[in-house]
Structures are given as C-alpha cells and as structure tokens.
Amino acid sequence: MSKLHIEPFFHAGTGTWTYVVHRGGDAVVIDPVLDYDPKSGRIGTESVRAVQQYLQDNGVTLRRVLETHAHADHLTSAQILHAATGAPVGIGTGIRKVQAHFAGVFGLDPQDPALQEAFDATFSDGDRIEAGNLHFEVMATPGHTSDSLSYRIEDNVFVGDTLFAPDVGCARCDFPGGDASMLYDSIQRFYALPDATVLWLCHDYPPNGRPPRASVTVGESKAANVMLDGNTSREDFIARRRARDAQLAAPVLLYPSLQVNIRGGHLPPAQANGRRYLSTPLQGEIPAALG
Ligand SMILES: [Fe+2]
C-alpha cells in the first residue's frame, strides 16, 4: 500500500491547522476553516479553496470531512467541501449536548432539522472510520468540550484542541461541557501511546516569534509540555488549568463560530430581506430602560 501523506494548512487569523490526509486516491480533510472577518461580517472561501486546490493537484478524491469538535474560535467550511464532493461530514456524538446547550443560547429549537440533520455521521469512542483505503480509529477525548474526538491512523493522532505545542500547553476547559479532570484523562490516553506517535494539533499560537508547528511526538509532549508533562498529577493540572482559564477572555469568534458550527457549517437562514445574520446574546444586567 502506498505511503500515508499528511498535509497541514495553517490559518493564521485563528491559529488553526487543517489537515488533508491521503493515500493512493483517497483523502480526508480534518477541521477545514471558513474565513470570516468579524469587523465587516465578510465570509470568505480562500482557505478552503487552497485545500480544494491541493486535492485537485494531487488527484485525490475526498471521502470524508471530519471535525474534531464544535469549534468556538473559527467557522468550519465543511459544507463547502460537502457541496463540492458529496463527502459526508462527521463529528462526535457529544455534539448533541453542545447543540442542546447552544440551542438555548441562540433561541433555537433543539429538534430543528438544521441541528438534528447538521452532520452526516456521528462517532463514538472505538468506532472505526473507513474512507477508501484510509482507516481511522476514533478516540473520545473530552475535556476541552464534551464532543471532542481524536482520530488515530497508524502512528498519527489528530488530537483537536486536546493538546497544544509543548511551549503553549493545552486547551482551556471552561466552555460549557468542559472539564479539566476529563481533559487530564484524555491526555493520559495519548501519553500511554508509544513515544514516537505523532500528535497533530488543531491549533498553534506560537510564542516569541517561533514559526507555527503542526505536530509534536508523544515523547516530546511528555517531556516538555508546560501545562502537563508525563509526571504532572491530576490535582496539579486541574489547579493550573483553572487558574489559567480564569484569566482568559471569551474567544473573539465564540458566538459566530458556534452558531455556524452546531449547524454543521451551514449559516443561519436568510431573513425576509434576503440577508443572513449572526447574533450575539447580550450579557450582564440589562437596564430596564433599554428594553
Ligand atoms: Fe476548540
């Protein structure tokens, strides 16, 4: 069988890594990004077009689009790829919980087909995903979100936001459904893999001007991850994670992202004037005079 190839694409605006995984004529795309400028409301497809061009240039057929979780920091372009190729879009079964929570936040009916039918496939721990001659094993890795999955193929794991580069640490756990103790357990599953296993990151936020990096080995993360190395206790990690999360602001694209991503990447329906809108639930005490 021909060699497995992994091609990372970095979205500088959100620090997101998208991957094309391919072998022979078959490909899978993991965590594709839709460009969105929150200042102007402009939606763009430049990033996903680069992925499509790569698929075309390499003569490979897209078999599936996989999401590691419902992202809160960027919009997914899964539906652009789905519309162009028919490739089914998959995510973790935990998406139901995320959809139910944010249906409440955005005033949607949780039974709305736009949510219920948003994804073509949902996966659970231990599932095997077939995509032509690519075979992935699903690892449920909750903690950052309840729907977080990692996708393992041979000695590679696409870990979503579970782990970041050693000098960055790991994802926050203060979103709805997040849980630092669960994230600790999820990361221990990676740390139990052979040291040479390559962990492919969904994000990088390079400090001190270093170039973005897409991957880290299990061995390197166990030796050097600033948030939890191979010796960090659960108690230390939870304390460290909570202290850090208390300092973090909401992601800029939190509400735009979730409105689109719980719909599998579809935008909210057009209003009577033909335009589409993303809404922001207001926070804090609302003075009665403003009602
Ligand atoms: Fe995330």
Image: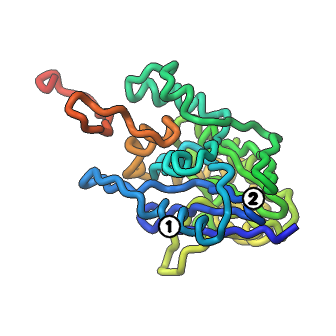
* Mark in the foreground, 2 or 1: 1
State the SS at label 1. Answer: helix
Given residues 102 and 221, the one toward you in this image is 102
Given residues 145 and 131, the one toward you in this image is 131
Does the image show residue 246? no
Figure quadrant of the C terminus: top left
Q: Residues within 10 Å of mark 1 (few under 14, many from 20)?
A: few
Q: Which amino acid does label 1 sit on?
A: Ala
* Residue 157: assigned label: 2
Q: In which quarter of the image is residue 225?
A: bottom right
Given residues 270 and 213, the one toward you in this image is 270
What is the image's colouring? Answer: rainbow
> Residue visible at 32% across and 56% down?
37
> Residue visible at 49% across and 60% down?
48
Q: Looking at the image, do the residues carrying marks 2 and 1 touch, with CB atoms under 8 Å apart?
A: no
> Residue visible at 48% across and 79% down?
208
